Amino acid sequence: MNRHSSYWVFLVHRLSGIALALFLPVHFWALGNALRLDALLAWTQQPLVKFAEWGLVVLLAAHLGGGLRVLALEFLPWRDWQKGLTAAAAAVTFAAGLAFALAL
Amino acid sequence: MSTLAVEVWRGGAQGAFQSFEVPRYPSQTVLDVVTYIQRSLDPTLAYRFACRVGMCGSCAMTVNGVPRWTCRTHVDKVSRENKLVIGPLRNLPVIRDLVTDMREFFDKWARAKGSFGGNRTRQDELARVPPDSADRKKVDAGIECIGCGVCYSACDVVAWNPDYLGPAALNRAWTLVKDERDVAKTERLRAVAGDAGCHACHTHMSCTERCPMGLSPTAGISGLKRAVLGSALKGGL
Amino acid sequence: MSARTQTLLWIAQRASAAVLALCVIVHLFTIIYAVQGGLSAAEILGRTRGNVAWFTFYSIFVLGVAVHAPIGLRSIFIEWLGWRGRSRDGVVVAFAAVLAWMGMRAVFAVFV
Protein backbone atom coordinates (compact mmCIF):
# COMPACT_ATOMS: atom_id res chain seq x y z
CA MET A 1 0.00 0.00 0.00
CA ASN A 2 1.57 3.30 -1.03
CA ARG A 3 1.86 5.58 1.93
CA HIS A 4 1.98 9.33 1.62
CA SER A 5 3.45 12.03 3.88
CA SER A 6 0.29 12.90 5.81
CA TYR A 7 -0.04 9.30 6.87
CA TRP A 8 3.53 9.26 8.18
CA VAL A 9 3.14 12.45 10.18
CA PHE A 10 0.00 10.92 11.74
CA LEU A 11 1.87 7.71 12.57
CA VAL A 12 4.77 9.60 14.17
CA HIS A 13 2.25 11.65 16.13
CA ARG A 14 0.42 8.58 17.41
CA LEU A 15 3.53 6.50 18.21
CA SER A 16 5.22 9.43 19.97
CA GLY A 17 2.01 9.92 21.96
CA ILE A 18 2.07 6.29 23.10
CA ALA A 19 5.74 6.56 24.05
CA LEU A 20 5.13 9.76 26.02
CA ALA A 21 2.07 8.27 27.76
CA LEU A 22 4.22 5.33 28.88
CA PHE A 23 7.12 7.60 29.89
CA LEU A 24 5.17 10.16 31.92
CA PRO A 25 4.28 8.01 34.95
CA VAL A 26 7.98 7.16 35.25
CA HIS A 27 8.92 10.83 34.88
CA PHE A 28 6.40 11.86 37.55
CA TRP A 29 7.56 9.10 39.88
CA ALA A 30 11.19 10.19 39.56
CA LEU A 31 10.39 13.86 40.16
CA GLY A 32 8.14 12.94 43.08
CA ASN A 33 11.22 11.54 44.73
CA ALA A 34 12.86 14.96 44.67
CA LEU A 35 14.56 14.41 48.03
CA ARG A 36 16.62 11.64 46.47
CA LEU A 37 17.13 13.67 43.30
CA ASP A 38 20.95 13.77 43.39
CA ALA A 39 21.20 10.01 43.39
CA LEU A 40 18.83 9.90 40.46
CA LEU A 41 20.66 12.70 38.64
CA ALA A 42 23.94 10.84 39.05
CA TRP A 43 22.32 7.90 37.26
CA THR A 44 21.21 10.19 34.45
CA GLN A 45 24.82 11.08 33.61
CA GLN A 46 25.27 7.75 31.85
CA PRO A 47 25.51 8.12 28.04
CA LEU A 48 22.67 5.69 27.37
CA VAL A 49 20.37 7.65 29.64
CA LYS A 50 21.42 10.91 28.01
CA PHE A 51 20.61 9.42 24.63
CA ALA A 52 17.20 8.31 25.93
CA GLU A 53 16.56 11.84 27.25
CA TRP A 54 17.41 13.25 23.85
CA GLY A 55 15.04 10.70 22.32
CA LEU A 56 12.26 11.85 24.63
CA VAL A 57 12.81 15.51 23.72
CA VAL A 58 12.59 14.55 20.05
CA LEU A 59 9.39 12.55 20.69
CA LEU A 60 7.87 15.46 22.58
CA ALA A 61 8.74 17.92 19.81
CA ALA A 62 7.46 15.50 17.17
CA HIS A 63 4.19 15.10 19.03
CA LEU A 64 3.90 18.88 19.39
CA GLY A 65 4.59 19.41 15.69
CA GLY A 66 2.07 16.78 14.62
CA GLY A 67 -0.46 18.15 17.09
CA LEU A 68 -0.13 21.72 15.84
CA ARG A 69 -0.71 20.34 12.34
CA VAL A 70 -4.00 18.70 13.45
CA LEU A 71 -5.15 21.89 15.19
CA ALA A 72 -4.33 23.90 12.06
CA LEU A 73 -6.23 21.48 9.79
CA GLU A 74 -9.26 21.44 12.05
CA PHE A 75 -9.53 25.08 13.08
CA LEU A 76 -7.84 27.30 10.51
CA PRO A 77 -9.34 28.16 7.13
CA TRP A 78 -8.65 25.39 4.66
CA ARG A 79 -5.83 25.80 2.23
CA ASP A 80 -5.02 23.31 -0.50
CA TRP A 81 -1.35 22.67 0.05
CA GLN A 82 -1.39 20.66 3.26
CA LYS A 83 2.11 19.29 2.94
CA GLY A 84 3.44 22.57 4.35
CA LEU A 85 2.04 21.60 7.74
CA THR A 86 3.87 18.28 7.62
CA ALA A 87 7.07 20.11 6.74
CA ALA A 88 6.54 22.51 9.64
CA ALA A 89 6.03 19.58 12.04
CA ALA A 90 9.25 18.00 10.86
CA ALA A 91 11.08 21.32 11.23
CA VAL A 92 9.93 21.75 14.85
CA THR A 93 11.09 18.22 15.67
CA PHE A 94 14.46 18.74 14.04
CA ALA A 95 15.01 22.12 15.72
CA ALA A 96 14.21 20.80 19.19
CA GLY A 97 16.36 17.70 18.72
CA LEU A 98 19.29 19.78 17.56
CA ALA A 99 18.93 22.36 20.33
CA PHE A 100 18.83 19.69 23.03
CA ALA A 101 21.76 17.80 21.58
CA LEU A 102 23.83 21.00 21.51
CA ALA A 103 22.85 21.85 25.07
CA LEU A 104 23.92 18.49 26.44
CA MET B 1 5.78 -7.38 -27.77
CA SER B 2 6.23 -7.30 -24.04
CA THR B 3 3.89 -8.96 -21.59
CA LEU B 4 2.58 -8.02 -18.20
CA ALA B 5 2.65 -10.44 -15.29
CA VAL B 6 -0.72 -9.76 -13.67
CA GLU B 7 -1.92 -11.15 -10.32
CA VAL B 8 -5.67 -10.98 -9.89
CA TRP B 9 -7.66 -11.77 -6.75
CA ARG B 10 -9.99 -14.74 -7.19
CA GLY B 11 -12.54 -15.85 -4.65
CA GLY B 12 -14.38 -14.07 -1.86
CA ALA B 13 -13.04 -13.13 1.56
CA GLN B 14 -11.05 -16.36 1.26
CA GLY B 15 -9.25 -16.86 -1.99
CA ALA B 16 -5.94 -16.36 -3.72
CA PHE B 17 -4.21 -14.34 -6.39
CA GLN B 18 -4.16 -15.98 -9.81
CA SER B 19 -1.42 -15.18 -12.33
CA PHE B 20 -2.07 -14.20 -15.91
CA GLU B 21 0.17 -13.10 -18.78
CA VAL B 22 -1.30 -10.18 -20.68
CA PRO B 23 0.12 -8.54 -23.84
CA ARG B 24 1.31 -5.04 -23.09
CA TYR B 25 0.27 -2.16 -25.36
CA PRO B 26 1.01 1.57 -25.28
CA SER B 27 -1.74 3.69 -23.66
CA GLN B 28 -3.18 0.60 -22.01
CA THR B 29 -5.33 1.07 -18.92
CA VAL B 30 -5.72 -1.38 -16.04
CA LEU B 31 -9.35 -1.84 -17.11
CA ASP B 32 -8.09 -2.90 -20.56
CA VAL B 33 -5.96 -5.51 -18.80
CA VAL B 34 -8.85 -6.87 -16.73
CA THR B 35 -11.12 -6.90 -19.79
CA TYR B 36 -8.52 -8.80 -21.80
CA ILE B 37 -8.22 -11.42 -19.06
CA GLN B 38 -11.99 -11.93 -18.86
CA ARG B 39 -12.53 -12.06 -22.63
CA SER B 40 -9.49 -14.00 -23.76
CA LEU B 41 -8.10 -15.94 -20.82
CA ASP B 42 -10.70 -16.67 -18.16
CA PRO B 43 -14.38 -15.87 -18.71
CA THR B 44 -15.21 -16.70 -15.08
CA LEU B 45 -13.49 -13.53 -13.80
CA ALA B 46 -16.04 -11.20 -12.17
CA TYR B 47 -15.52 -7.42 -12.31
CA ARG B 48 -17.53 -4.21 -12.63
CA PHE B 49 -17.32 -1.41 -15.14
CA ALA B 50 -19.77 0.82 -16.99
CA CYS B 51 -18.77 4.03 -18.75
CA ARG B 52 -15.02 3.17 -19.05
CA VAL B 53 -14.30 6.89 -19.56
CA GLY B 54 -13.82 8.11 -15.98
CA MET B 55 -17.32 9.35 -15.15
CA CYS B 56 -19.16 6.64 -13.25
CA GLY B 57 -16.65 5.22 -10.75
CA SER B 58 -17.85 1.61 -11.22
CA CYS B 59 -14.42 0.25 -12.17
CA ALA B 60 -12.73 1.15 -8.88
CA MET B 61 -10.32 -1.57 -7.72
CA THR B 62 -7.11 -1.89 -5.74
CA VAL B 63 -4.12 -1.63 -8.07
CA ASN B 64 -0.69 -2.34 -6.55
CA GLY B 65 -2.14 -1.59 -3.12
CA VAL B 66 -3.83 1.70 -4.04
CA PRO B 67 -7.57 2.19 -4.78
CA ARG B 68 -8.06 3.67 -8.23
CA TRP B 69 -10.45 3.95 -11.15
CA THR B 70 -8.99 1.30 -13.43
CA CYS B 71 -10.28 2.96 -16.62
CA ARG B 72 -8.31 6.07 -15.71
CA THR B 73 -5.14 4.29 -14.59
CA HIS B 74 -2.55 3.81 -17.28
CA VAL B 75 -0.47 0.70 -16.90
CA ASP B 76 2.63 2.79 -17.63
CA LYS B 77 1.90 4.89 -14.57
CA VAL B 78 1.59 2.09 -12.03
CA SER B 79 3.44 -0.92 -13.31
CA ARG B 80 7.05 -1.54 -12.46
CA GLU B 81 9.03 -4.34 -14.12
CA ASN B 82 5.92 -5.31 -16.11
CA LYS B 83 4.04 -6.44 -12.97
CA LEU B 84 0.54 -5.62 -11.74
CA VAL B 85 -1.43 -6.77 -8.71
CA ILE B 86 -5.19 -6.19 -8.96
CA GLY B 87 -7.65 -6.79 -6.15
CA PRO B 88 -11.09 -5.70 -5.01
CA LEU B 89 -11.57 -2.44 -3.08
CA ARG B 90 -10.47 -2.64 0.55
CA ASN B 91 -12.88 -2.22 3.48
CA LEU B 92 -15.84 -3.74 1.64
CA PRO B 93 -17.06 -7.35 1.66
CA VAL B 94 -16.00 -9.21 -1.48
CA ILE B 95 -18.83 -10.79 -3.47
CA ARG B 96 -16.51 -12.46 -5.94
CA ASP B 97 -13.09 -11.69 -7.43
CA LEU B 98 -12.99 -7.95 -8.09
CA VAL B 99 -16.61 -7.20 -7.16
CA THR B 100 -17.44 -5.79 -3.73
CA ASP B 101 -20.70 -5.36 -1.83
CA MET B 102 -21.34 -1.61 -1.67
CA ARG B 103 -24.36 -1.79 0.63
CA GLU B 104 -22.52 -0.79 3.83
CA PHE B 105 -20.98 2.16 2.00
CA PHE B 106 -24.43 3.50 1.10
CA ASP B 107 -26.00 2.54 4.43
CA LYS B 108 -23.43 4.75 6.14
CA TRP B 109 -24.33 7.53 3.72
CA ALA B 110 -27.90 7.29 5.01
CA ARG B 111 -26.77 7.04 8.65
CA ALA B 112 -24.85 10.29 8.21
CA LYS B 113 -28.13 11.84 7.08
CA GLY B 114 -26.60 12.39 3.68
CA SER B 115 -29.83 13.39 2.00
CA PHE B 116 -31.40 16.79 1.54
CA GLY B 117 -34.12 18.01 3.90
CA GLY B 118 -36.03 20.97 2.51
CA ASN B 119 -39.17 22.83 3.57
CA ARG B 120 -40.40 24.43 0.35
CA THR B 121 -43.10 23.16 -1.95
CA ARG B 122 -43.65 23.80 -5.62
CA GLN B 123 -45.94 26.64 -4.56
CA ASP B 124 -43.06 28.54 -2.97
CA GLU B 125 -40.56 30.71 -4.73
CA LEU B 126 -37.29 29.18 -5.86
CA ALA B 127 -34.45 29.58 -3.40
CA ARG B 128 -31.88 32.06 -4.57
CA VAL B 129 -28.36 30.91 -3.74
CA PRO B 130 -25.51 33.11 -5.00
CA PRO B 131 -22.86 30.74 -6.41
CA ASP B 132 -20.06 32.91 -5.08
CA SER B 133 -21.33 33.06 -1.50
CA ALA B 134 -18.84 31.62 1.00
CA ASP B 135 -21.09 28.71 1.96
CA ARG B 136 -22.00 27.79 -1.59
CA LYS B 137 -18.33 27.70 -2.56
CA LYS B 138 -17.74 25.21 0.23
CA VAL B 139 -20.64 23.08 -0.99
CA ASP B 140 -19.42 23.25 -4.58
CA ALA B 141 -15.98 22.09 -3.49
CA GLY B 142 -17.47 18.82 -2.27
CA ILE B 143 -20.60 18.27 -4.35
CA GLU B 144 -19.13 16.31 -7.26
CA CYS B 145 -18.85 13.04 -5.35
CA ILE B 146 -20.16 10.12 -7.40
CA GLY B 147 -20.01 7.55 -4.63
CA CYS B 148 -17.25 5.40 -6.16
CA GLY B 149 -15.87 4.19 -2.84
CA VAL B 150 -12.20 4.95 -3.50
CA CYS B 151 -11.91 7.26 -0.46
CA TYR B 152 -13.69 4.71 1.74
CA SER B 153 -11.20 2.08 0.61
CA ALA B 154 -8.23 4.34 1.14
CA CYS B 155 -9.26 5.26 4.69
CA ASP B 156 -7.36 3.50 7.49
CA VAL B 157 -9.86 4.57 10.13
CA VAL B 158 -12.58 2.72 8.19
CA ALA B 159 -10.30 -0.32 8.26
CA TRP B 160 -9.65 0.04 11.99
CA ASN B 161 -13.16 1.01 13.13
CA PRO B 162 -16.04 -0.74 11.32
CA ASP B 163 -18.54 1.77 12.73
CA TYR B 164 -16.80 4.79 11.21
CA LEU B 165 -19.11 6.45 8.70
CA GLY B 166 -16.22 7.20 6.37
CA PRO B 167 -15.09 10.09 4.19
CA ALA B 168 -17.74 9.94 1.46
CA ALA B 169 -20.74 9.90 3.78
CA LEU B 170 -19.27 12.66 5.95
CA ASN B 171 -18.31 14.76 2.93
CA ARG B 172 -21.87 14.54 1.64
CA ALA B 173 -23.23 15.48 5.08
CA TRP B 174 -20.94 18.52 5.00
CA THR B 175 -22.28 19.70 1.66
CA LEU B 176 -25.78 19.56 3.15
CA VAL B 177 -24.79 21.29 6.39
CA LYS B 178 -23.51 24.18 4.28
CA ASP B 179 -26.57 24.20 2.02
CA GLU B 180 -28.67 27.18 3.06
CA ARG B 181 -31.86 25.54 1.76
CA ASP B 182 -31.50 22.50 4.03
CA VAL B 183 -33.47 22.49 7.29
CA ALA B 184 -32.32 19.18 8.78
CA LYS B 185 -29.02 20.51 10.11
CA THR B 186 -29.48 19.77 13.82
CA GLU B 187 -30.27 16.09 13.33
CA ARG B 188 -27.53 15.79 10.76
CA LEU B 189 -24.90 17.22 13.10
CA ARG B 190 -26.07 14.81 15.77
CA ALA B 191 -25.73 11.97 13.26
CA VAL B 192 -22.16 12.83 12.31
CA ALA B 193 -20.80 13.52 15.81
CA GLY B 194 -18.86 11.08 17.95
CA ASP B 195 -16.68 7.97 17.70
CA ALA B 196 -18.37 6.76 14.53
CA GLY B 197 -18.51 10.20 12.97
CA CYS B 198 -16.34 13.14 12.11
CA HIS B 199 -14.41 12.99 15.41
CA ALA B 200 -12.79 9.72 14.42
CA CYS B 201 -10.99 11.34 11.49
CA HIS B 202 -7.28 11.68 12.23
CA THR B 203 -6.39 13.71 9.15
CA HIS B 204 -4.35 10.98 7.44
CA MET B 205 -5.79 12.57 4.29
CA SER B 206 -5.67 9.36 2.28
CA CYS B 207 -9.16 10.19 1.03
CA THR B 208 -8.00 13.55 -0.30
CA GLU B 209 -4.88 11.97 -1.76
CA ARG B 210 -6.83 9.32 -3.69
CA CYS B 211 -10.14 10.96 -4.65
CA PRO B 212 -10.35 10.73 -8.45
CA MET B 213 -12.63 13.79 -8.51
CA GLY B 214 -10.06 15.88 -6.65
CA LEU B 215 -12.31 16.41 -3.64
CA SER B 216 -11.06 16.78 -0.10
CA PRO B 217 -13.26 14.93 2.37
CA THR B 218 -10.74 15.93 5.06
CA ALA B 219 -11.71 19.56 4.48
CA GLY B 220 -15.39 18.70 4.79
CA ILE B 221 -14.84 16.59 7.89
CA SER B 222 -12.82 19.40 9.53
CA GLY B 223 -15.76 21.67 8.74
CA LEU B 224 -18.13 19.19 10.38
CA LYS B 225 -15.94 19.14 13.50
CA ARG B 226 -16.28 22.91 13.77
CA ALA B 227 -20.02 22.82 13.03
CA VAL B 228 -20.59 20.15 15.68
CA LEU B 229 -18.54 22.21 18.15
CA GLY B 230 -20.75 25.21 17.44
CA SER B 231 -23.87 23.12 17.88
CA ALA B 232 -22.58 21.58 21.14
CA LEU B 233 -21.77 24.99 22.57
CA LYS B 234 -25.32 26.12 21.80
CA GLY B 235 -26.78 23.02 23.43
CA GLY B 236 -27.99 21.60 20.13
CA LEU B 237 -26.38 18.16 20.35
CA MET C 1 -21.61 6.67 25.67
CA SER C 2 -23.68 9.14 23.68
CA ALA C 3 -22.45 11.04 20.64
CA ARG C 4 -22.72 14.17 22.75
CA THR C 5 -20.33 12.84 25.41
CA GLN C 6 -17.94 11.65 22.72
CA THR C 7 -18.05 15.16 21.25
CA LEU C 8 -17.22 16.63 24.66
CA LEU C 9 -14.22 14.28 24.86
CA TRP C 10 -13.03 15.56 21.48
CA ILE C 11 -13.48 19.16 22.66
CA ALA C 12 -11.53 18.43 25.86
CA GLN C 13 -8.79 16.79 23.78
CA ARG C 14 -8.38 19.78 21.46
CA ALA C 15 -8.69 22.39 24.24
CA SER C 16 -6.09 20.60 26.37
CA ALA C 17 -3.92 20.28 23.26
CA ALA C 18 -3.91 24.04 22.79
CA VAL C 19 -2.99 24.61 26.45
CA LEU C 20 -0.34 21.89 26.33
CA ALA C 21 1.18 23.32 23.15
CA LEU C 22 2.08 26.45 25.13
CA CYS C 23 3.22 24.42 28.14
CA VAL C 24 5.40 22.15 26.00
CA ILE C 25 7.08 25.06 24.24
CA VAL C 26 7.91 26.64 27.62
CA HIS C 27 9.03 23.25 28.98
CA LEU C 28 11.31 22.55 26.01
CA PHE C 29 13.01 25.93 26.35
CA THR C 30 13.30 25.47 30.11
CA ILE C 31 14.89 22.04 29.99
CA ILE C 32 17.24 22.97 27.17
CA TYR C 33 18.36 25.91 29.33
CA ALA C 34 18.52 23.88 32.54
CA VAL C 35 20.40 20.94 31.08
CA GLN C 36 23.38 23.08 30.04
CA GLY C 37 26.36 22.55 32.28
CA GLY C 38 24.86 19.44 33.88
CA LEU C 39 22.04 18.91 36.35
CA SER C 40 22.16 18.85 40.14
CA ALA C 41 19.38 18.56 42.69
CA ALA C 42 20.62 21.56 44.62
CA GLU C 43 20.66 23.71 41.49
CA ILE C 44 17.20 22.64 40.34
CA LEU C 45 15.46 22.62 43.70
CA GLY C 46 17.12 25.90 44.62
CA ARG C 47 15.29 27.46 41.67
CA THR C 48 12.00 25.67 42.06
CA ARG C 49 11.20 25.29 45.75
CA GLY C 50 8.72 27.89 46.94
CA ASN C 51 8.20 29.28 43.44
CA VAL C 52 4.48 29.98 43.12
CA ALA C 53 4.57 30.91 39.44
CA TRP C 54 6.24 27.69 38.33
CA PHE C 55 4.07 25.69 40.75
CA THR C 56 1.00 27.08 39.02
CA PHE C 57 2.45 26.53 35.56
CA TYR C 58 3.33 22.89 36.18
CA SER C 59 0.02 22.20 37.92
CA ILE C 60 -1.76 23.36 34.76
CA PHE C 61 0.66 21.26 32.69
CA VAL C 62 -0.02 18.12 34.76
CA LEU C 63 -3.79 18.53 34.69
CA GLY C 64 -3.68 19.21 30.95
CA VAL C 65 -1.73 16.01 30.43
CA ALA C 66 -4.17 14.07 32.64
CA VAL C 67 -6.98 15.12 30.28
CA HIS C 68 -5.14 14.90 26.96
CA ALA C 69 -3.20 11.63 27.15
CA PRO C 70 -6.03 9.30 28.28
CA ILE C 71 -8.42 10.59 25.60
CA GLY C 72 -5.71 10.00 23.00
CA LEU C 73 -5.14 6.49 24.30
CA ARG C 74 -8.89 5.85 24.15
CA SER C 75 -8.87 6.27 20.34
CA ILE C 76 -5.90 3.93 20.12
CA PHE C 77 -7.72 1.33 22.25
CA ILE C 78 -10.74 1.52 19.92
CA GLU C 79 -8.82 1.50 16.64
CA TRP C 80 -5.76 -0.64 17.27
CA LEU C 81 -6.95 -2.98 20.03
CA GLY C 82 -10.60 -3.20 18.92
CA TRP C 83 -11.59 -2.62 22.54
CA ARG C 84 -15.36 -2.14 22.76
CA GLY C 85 -17.34 -1.72 25.94
CA ARG C 86 -17.24 -0.03 29.27
CA SER C 87 -14.07 -1.63 30.65
CA ARG C 88 -12.09 0.34 28.09
CA ASP C 89 -13.42 3.67 29.36
CA GLY C 90 -12.84 2.52 32.94
CA VAL C 91 -9.15 1.97 32.15
CA VAL C 92 -8.97 5.37 30.46
CA VAL C 93 -10.41 7.13 33.52
CA ALA C 94 -8.08 5.15 35.81
CA PHE C 95 -5.09 6.22 33.76
CA ALA C 96 -6.21 9.85 34.00
CA ALA C 97 -6.41 9.51 37.77
CA VAL C 98 -2.94 7.94 37.96
CA LEU C 99 -1.41 10.73 35.85
CA ALA C 100 -3.12 13.44 37.87
CA TRP C 101 -2.12 11.94 41.20
CA MET C 102 1.48 11.13 40.34
CA GLY C 103 1.86 14.41 38.50
CA MET C 104 0.63 16.55 41.36
CA ARG C 105 2.78 14.54 43.77
CA ALA C 106 5.77 15.46 41.60
CA VAL C 107 4.71 19.12 41.41
CA PHE C 108 4.46 19.28 45.18
CA ALA C 109 7.82 17.55 45.64
CA VAL C 110 9.62 19.94 43.32
CA PHE C 111 7.87 23.27 43.87
CA VAL C 112 6.67 23.31 47.48
Image (cartoon, rainbow, N blue to C red):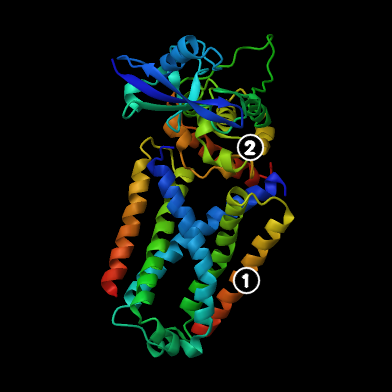
Query: Which residue sits furthest left?
Result: A102
Of badges 2 and 1, nearer the viewer stands: 1
Q: Residue at x 44, y 89 (%)?
A: A39
Q: Amino acid at mark 1?
A: Val
Q: Tell me the chain of label 2.
A: B
Q: Secondary structure at mark 2?
A: helix
- Find disc 1 in the rendering and name its residue: C98
Q: Nearer the viewer, residue B37 or B182?
A: B37
| Image location (x, y in percent) of residue C13 | 56, 55
Residue at screen point 68% across, 31% down: B111
**Residue in the image at 46% along x and 87% along y:** A37
Image position of B228 with respect to A32: above or below: above
Residue that label 2 marks: B192
In the picture provided, is C39 more to the left or to the right than B206? left
Disc 2 crowd rating (10 Å Cα; few below 14, some 14-19, many 20+) is many
Q: Is residue A35 left or right of residue B14?
A: left
User: Identity of the amino acid at label 2?
Assistant: Val
